[in-house]
Image (tube, grey):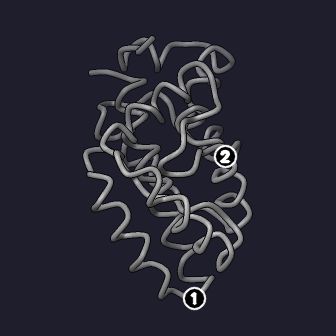
Amino acid sequence: MPLTLTDFNAADADDVRPALTACLAVPRWVDAILERRPYESRDALTAAADLPLSSDEIRQAMAAHPRIGEKPKQQGTEGDWSRSEQSGVDNADAFAAANAEYEAKFGHVYLVCASGRSGEELLKILESRLDNDPATELAVAGRELLKIAELRLAKAVTA
């Protein structure tokens, strides 16, 4: 259930930690968001969420995300958000081969902020990112994780 910014600022850290973890499964990120409370505005909260991630944190967070085109395995808030974010993906069969090629090259799932994008657009993005070297691609995936986290944070904490 979403919290107002006022309630989020006043809540016990243990009570909001699960919602923040559903936004981004990186303990350091969650701790940083909690430690910087209270926030004066949602813009300030969003700005705090833009925290650079290490390569290990990116890999850890990617493990919590389903493949594009596959149904999320998670239950609860995170699974609901994933289903909503991928609602435009109607070409799951095309993604099976593309995901396999991507994972063979990079060793992790293709991660992109899918919200509001069509399956065709997401597949074109995947194909274009196959030209990246592994370090560049990991950095791109990290930026996408932060975009997803910011969208989810906006769902978790309202005005």
Q: Residue type at mark 2: give it.
A: Val
Q: Which of disc 1 and disc 2 is earlier in sequence?
A: 2
Q: Position of residue 126 (x, y in %)?
A: 43, 70
Residue 147 vertical placement versus 22 (above, below): below
Helix, strand or loop for disc 1: loop
* Mark 2 lies on residue: 26
Residue occupying the point 52% across, 56% down: 51
Residue occupying the point 62% across, 22% down: 75
Q: CA distance from mark 2 to mark 1?
A: 24 Å
Label drawn at residue 51: none
Q: Position of residue 16 (x, y in %)?
A: 58, 20
Residue occupying the point 55% across, 28% down: 79
Residue 136 vertical placement versus 16 (above, below): below
Q: Position of residue 112 (x, y in %)?
A: 44, 58
Q: Circle 2: is it few (<14), some (14-19), or many (20+) Cα within 10 Å?
A: many
Quarter of the view holding residue 73:
top right
Helix, strand or loop for disc 2: loop
Quarter of the view holding residue 121:
bottom left
* Mark 1 lies on residue: 133
26 horizontally vs 34: left or right: right
Residue occupying the point 59% across, 45% down: 66
Q: Residue type at mark 1: give it.
A: Asp
Q: Position of residue 53 (x, y in %)?
A: 60, 61
120 horizontally vs 92: left or right: left
* On-image quarter of the C terminus: top left
